[in-house]
Amino acid sequence: MCQQPSIPLISEKIVFYGAGSMAEAIVRGMIARSVVASDHVVVLNRSSNERLAELRARYSVLASNDPEQKTEYLRTAPVIVLAMKPKDAAEALRTLGPLLNPDQLVISVIAGLTIRTIQGLLGRQQPVVRTMPNTSSSIGLGATGISFSKEVDEKGRRLALNMFEAVGLTSVIDEERMEILTGISGSGPAYIYYMMEAMIAAGIRGGLSVEQSGELTVQTVLGAARMVQQTGETPAALRKKVTSPNGSTQAALEVLDKGDFFETVIAAVNRCAERSREMGAALEKELSK
Ligand SMILES: NC(=O)C1=CN([C@@H]2O[C@H](COP(=O)(O)OP(=O)(O)OC[C@H]3O[C@@H](n4cnc5c(N)ncnc54)[C@H](OP(=O)(O)O)[C@@H]3O)[C@@H](O)[C@H]2O)C=CC1
Ligand SMILES: O=C(O)[C@@H]1CCC=N1
């Protein structure tokens, strides 16, 4: 694993095929860290011109919905990032396949979609990088799992790593582990936000102002994560330091345990992984159509 090393400038043109939250998070993170010039980033979507205008205004990237120009970008870009929803991926890949030449690197951020299915839908053994980033990439604090198809050469590996190292931590993993990684870090921000929503609501119900409860919760989550990172102590050891025998924290944790908090979180992570597999299986079925 590595985080925020000095990243060389990426000189290749990168086309984002899909221009939603995840594409924007990566674009924003890369541009904020100046690892790519904005005129080397192209964003394409299916139909929303307003969205493309928004991204153009925010990041000075290139964007187009003109069918001929779209085709030209896809035909020539050294790197194409697949960033549409799983339900839209099959059609997009079938259209993309015939446009590609063998050197173009395809990087997917799509949950569940396997390298085998991507190559099958493209109809060619394209070099493919399967990733699972998260939206914290937008502030350089992403966590991205990465797997490579055997066709990806050293230059392609380095390029993909540079992209995601620029926006946070990267972890190269066997593709079979991508679903469980999705359960931890791909979807993980949502669990933390949900926990924060509940803490903020509790504070407000107890009489704190919305601002007070929000600020205290954010600082608490930030401080807890930094403590784990900076002290090198385990979350369990740090938890014990907060928990005085028979004190208030112990009382709170007992309530969480009554709700089977620990096993519930594990079940949620596992269900996320299972759902990713289900989405992958649905896309794999597209191969026989
Ligand atoms: N959001 C997250 O936290 C994470 C998401 N992911 C993955 O990222 C992918 C995108 O998710 P997210 O950004 O949230 O989705 P969004 O709904 O925000 O964006 C989807 C984008 O895909 C575009 N699109 C749809 N069909 C096509 C097509 N045929 N050709 C080109 N573009 C198309 C849409 O364009 P239009 O608006 O014009 O229809 C839109 O710009 C998903 O596969 C998800 O699994 C991975 C990790 C984390
Ligand atoms: O919910 C989803 O399917 C995507 C994948 C990881 C985060 N969001």
Image: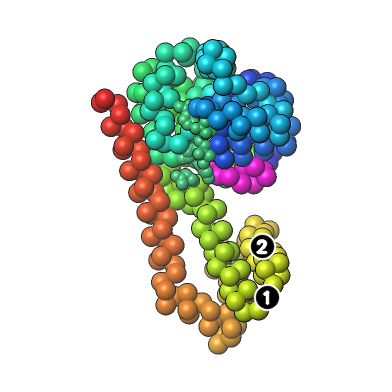
Q: Give the amino acid at mark 2.
A: Val
Image point 67% across, 45% down: which residue?
139
User: Does residue 227 appear in the picture of this structure?
Assistant: no
Which residues lie in the magenta part? 133-142
Residue 41 seen in render = yes
Q: Say which element carries label 2.
A: helix
Residue 242, labelled with which disc? none
Q: CA distance from mark 2 to mark 1?
A: 14 Å
Residue that protrudes farthest toward the left in the picture: 288
Q: Which residue is mark 2?
A: 218
Q: Is residue 132 left or right of residue 273?
A: right
Mark 1: secondary structure: loop
Find residue 208 and report its image quarter.
Answer: bottom right
Q: Residues within 10 Å of mark 1 (few under 14, many from 20)?
A: some
Which of these two is toward me, 69 or 107? 69
Camera-side mark, 2 or 1: 1
Q: What residue do we see at 42% from left, 55% from top?
A: 269
| Residue that extends furthest to the bottom in the rendered view of this protein | 246
Measured from the top left, where is residue 213 in percent x and y?
67, 70
Residue type at tag 1: Leu
- Can residue 137 be found in the magenta stretch? yes
In which quadrant is the N terminus drawn? top right
Question: Which residue position is annotated with label 1?
Answer: 208
Q: Nearer the viewer, residue 157 or 124?
A: 124
Q: Which residue is located at x 31 percent, y 38 percent?
A: 281
Say if 89 sits above or below 29 in the image. above
Return the x and y of residue 225 as percentages of the image width and height. Answer: 63, 60
